[in-house]
Amino acid sequence: MKYIIFIAILLLSFSFSKAQKVIKTSYKSEADKIIYVTEYKSEADMIVYETKYKSEAKPYSGIWFWTEYKSEADWKVFFTKYKSEANLKVYFTKYKSEAGMN
């Protein structure tokens, strides 16, 4: 029984850690994701829609909420000018329905 409860807690904490509340960092070394912004949707790994509401940010949905506090952020991101440095290529869209993994 304790084993099942432990697994349930572990899975819940893992699923919440994927939420996309993000903060921009000035240093590549402290970033969780190094982002390159593409000009074309077809080049992107993720299509991102920026929301004003924290409640809309869901795990890997591509809907990002920008937070002001590092402690609240699930991802600390650093934007790079070089595609080869990035571990995630994103395209920012104006349409919520386009958001998600590409």
Image: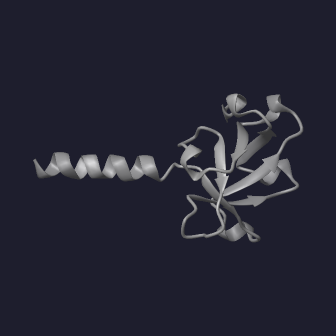
Please name the residue shown 65% across and 40% down the image.
62
Please name the residue shown 64% across and 42% down the image.
63
Query: How many numbered circles are shown?
Result: 0
Residue located farthest toward the front when viewing the structure as drawn: 53
Left or right of 73 in this view: 50: right
Taking 46 as reference, is 71 above or below it? below
Please name the residue shown 75% across and 52% down the image.
35
Taking 96 as reference, is 28 above or below it? below
Q: Is residue 37 visible?
A: yes
Q: Which image quarter is the C terminus in?
A: top right
Left or right of 58 in this view: 96: right
Residue 96 placed where, x, y %? 70, 34
Please name the residue shown 38% across and 53% down the image.
13
- The colour scheme of the drawn protein is one colour
Taking 68 as reference, is 35 above or below it? above
Q: Is residue 102 visible?
A: no
Choose top left, top right, bottom left or bottom right for residue 71.
Answer: bottom right
Residue 37 placed where, x, y %? 82, 46
Residue 56 placed where, x, y %? 58, 44
Taking 67 as reference, is 41 above or below it? above
Left or right of 38 in this view: 54: left
Choose top left, top right, bottom left or bottom right for residue 79.
Answer: bottom right
